[in-house]
Image: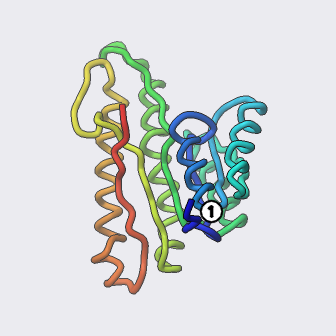
Amino acid sequence: MDRFLQGRTALVTGSTSGIGLAIAQALAAAGARVAINGLGTAEQVDAALASVAATGSESRHFGADLRNPAEIEAMMAAVQDWGALDVLVNCAGIQHAAPLAEQPAHKWDDIIAINLSAAFHTMQQALPGMAGRGYGRVVNIASVHGLVASKNKAPYVASKFGIVGLSKVAALEYGAGGRRARGGGPRPGGCPGGG
């Protein structure tokens, strides 16, 4: 495989399992050193790190509760100390299906925090450095639910519509037109995923 990300540092949220882990493995196979973040037992985290490291790239787990902006800020600082962040993939996401009138308020808060607000916080920390260095990639994992609604998924649908909108704003601010205006910068954008 072409190791076109050799020397680059990537962070993938929600990467201790599933789609996030597969993305972390692919980035590592392309040469990036990969910071993984996500839930799981110590054994699950160790297994995720080992699977990423098996590609020949360095990996490290950075724990943060993505519902907590202070923990996200601390994680981003720790990742930046490890290596200037070149690739950010916001993949973390949760869901709770229930009719709108029966959706627990704390589930709404958790889903919006993890699926949407965490992406805002990571991007706010990462984008200025990417722009300053003239290189960066941000991929926000959305869903078909960022385009169409579905019953019993009010917070999830709201979060995915929000991530699409957030990605579009970042693309306008940091994309090709913005890069010319500032003399360099990343081209972030949304990447609809499955679900």
Colour style of the rendered protein structure: rainbow
- Classify residue 100 by image quadrant: top left
- Classify residue 171 by image quadrant: bottom left
Residue found at the far front of this picture:
1
Q: Is residue 56 left or right of residue 69?
A: right
Q: Residue at x 62, y 64 (%)?
A: 9
Is 144 placed above or below 31 here?
Answer: above
99 vs 144, nearest the viewer: 144
Q: Position of residue 106 (x, y in %)?
A: 48, 25
Q: Locate the C terminus and report the quarter of the image it occupies.
A: top left
Q: Position of residue 112 (x, y in %)?
A: 42, 37
Q: Secondary structure at mark 1?
A: loop
Q: Is residue 124 left or right of residue 71?
A: left
Q: What amino acid does circle 1 point to?
A: Gly
Q: Position of residue 145 (x, y in %)?
A: 29, 34
Q: Residue at x 52, y 57 (%)?
A: 88
Q: Position of residue 135 (x, y in %)?
A: 49, 74
The crowding category of the residue bearing disc 1, from other C-alpha atoms within 10 Å (few below 14, some 14 to 19, many at least 20), is: many
Is 44 placed above or below 2 here?
Answer: above
Residue found at the far bottom of this picture:
183
Q: Residue at x 72, y 56 (%)?
A: 56
157 vs 53, nearest the viewer: 53
Is 173 placed above or below 78 here?
Answer: below
Q: Locate the N terminus and report the quarter of the image it occupies.
A: bottom right
State the count of labels.
1
Q: Please name the residue that numbered disc 1 is placed on.
A: 31
Q: Residue at x 72, y 44 (%)?
A: 49
Is 34 placed above or below 20 here?
Answer: below
47 vs 183, nearest the viewer: 47
